[in-house]
Image: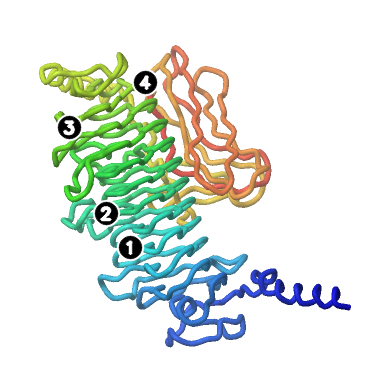
Amino acid sequence: MKLHLKKITLALLLLPLCGSGAYAATIYVKTSASNRSSGTGTTADPCTSLEYAFNRKAANGDTIALMGGTHTCNQYENLYAQKSNITITSKPGEWAVLDFASEPSGKQGIAVGKNTSNITISSLEIKNTKISGITLDGPNSKVLNCKIHDTGEAGIRNYGAGSTITGNEVWEANRNNRRSDGTPGAGASQISGIDSFRASGAYIANNTVWFVYGEGILINACDRMTVTNNRVHDVFSTAYYIDASTNSSVTNNESYSTYVTRFYSGGAPCNGVMMSHENASASTPTSITITGNTCRDAGKGFFFWKDNEGGMKNCKINDNSFGPCYKNLINVMTDSGHSNTEILRNRLDKSRSPSIIIPTNIRTDANNSSSSSSSSSSSSSSSSSSSSSSSSSGASTNLIGNPGFESGATGWTISAGKGQVDSVQPLTDRNSARLTTGTGGGIYRTISGLSPSTNYTLSVQAKLTTLGGGFHLYASGFGGSEVDGEITNVGSWRRTTISFTTGSSNTSVNIGVWRDSAGTGSFDDFVLQRR
């Protein structure tokens, strides 16, 4: 009998520990209400704002589910309560949009306060904020698979330690720096699409950032940051900017231009990767690894701008792919503080500009030959010559008019009853072409004015909703056998590329995407260039 009592007592003592996960609740938030501070959080009586649900109703470990549709937010969602391990997301099977168009000036979207920790924000759309879309102040928080756009400043601003920012799409950010004609440079601070300041240990990966009136992804005065496998294009200043940071890596990222000229600076697209000591109150760049990145159609592939003295210390800029570039493939400003830093084994496409400027106190190799001031002038001269030549011959120029369907279907044919041009799911600007109904069909056109016996590359950004339709990017009628490339990525945008060579007397090509059977997909930013 005593043995049985001991067992029962032990079971009762362990019960709260074993069942802690069972007490987690889901708190629901409805789309709009005049009173932001009511509701019990049930599906029958949902809370009337995210702020109220978080600060007053949710307990540690709970999930806050925002009901599908547009949540009209007339003030920012201030998550200030001392709570942890809370997930904020759309209700399963639905998609919640937080629209801050009616909030007062000077306010952000969702602010995760310093007293919080381990807060996850996922699968939400946030738009029209006066300053940042999401701000993270507490440690170990996450922003996952969100769409953030039309923000006054950063799409995501991170001050916290150990943050994870992955799988997000950020566009039309830092609009406070936009002039009345739609171009950047209104005089506001150049904030980034994803912006980290005095943060540490963050992981920033697999995000897509475009149309930012400042930098793409910035780490400023940060330590132990990882920036990897992101994609940035058509931003104003620099795709990836490392300022006054330490012990961090920028690896396997991509930057490119789709030739949206309103984001050009000094007559050229943004730089690929830039490092500096612009923030004089923080450390000179130290122990930064930049490797495996691809930066094409940039102003400068890699650029070090010193601003404040100190140079780069213990940095590695190795095994990247830079070019073609409009100005310099590599440009490192002279600084006596450079030490134990190397630029090695980078693959350089010199078809537009061969200019490489690397001071003698940085270790380099034959592929990154150092330039003195006299040879730099020579390099700049040859760069201008090369640029003029490539422009006249069509190299590195997109030969497709209306490549992103911003003028509707002008110049294109879409198989009748199979799809349309609309603004439902664009990658850049406001439109994309989609194949949505029926089976088979395609989006196609003919491009004339090519040169005979010339190599060309054709590419398109594609995002499939379902796989199985047999989607292909193709080129035919150019004087050789049809070339196609299968498109297989589901759920995220990826660029598919093929190449072909025109025949000895052929000056045109038929291009497009084709669907063999049923399936849905979106297509944007076609590019045809001479190789």
Q: Which mark is residue 191?
A: 2
Please report whichever mark, 2 or 3, sits nearer to the chain's N-terminal start: 2
x, y (%) of residue 152? 29, 62
Q: Quadrant of the C terminus?
A: top left
What's the residue at 57%, 23% (across, down)?
Answer: 482
What's the residue at 86%, 75% (across, down)?
Answer: 4
Residue at label 4?
345
x, y (%) of residue 193? 34, 52
Amino acid type, residue under disc 2 in the picture = Ile
Amino acid type, residue under disc 1 in the picture = Ser
Q: Which mark is residue 132?
A: 1
Contact between labelled residues 1 and 4, with CB atoms less than 8 Å apart: no
Residue at label 3?
337
What's the residue at 30%, 20% (across, down)?
Answer: 350
Is 510 left, or right, of 356 in this rendering?
right
Q: Is residue 342 above or below residue 439?
A: above
Q: Quadrant of the N terminus?
A: bottom right
Q: Is residue 363 above or below residue 238?
A: above
Nearer the camera: disc 3 or disc 1: 3
Q: How many marks?
A: 4
- Residue placed farthest to the right in the image? 1
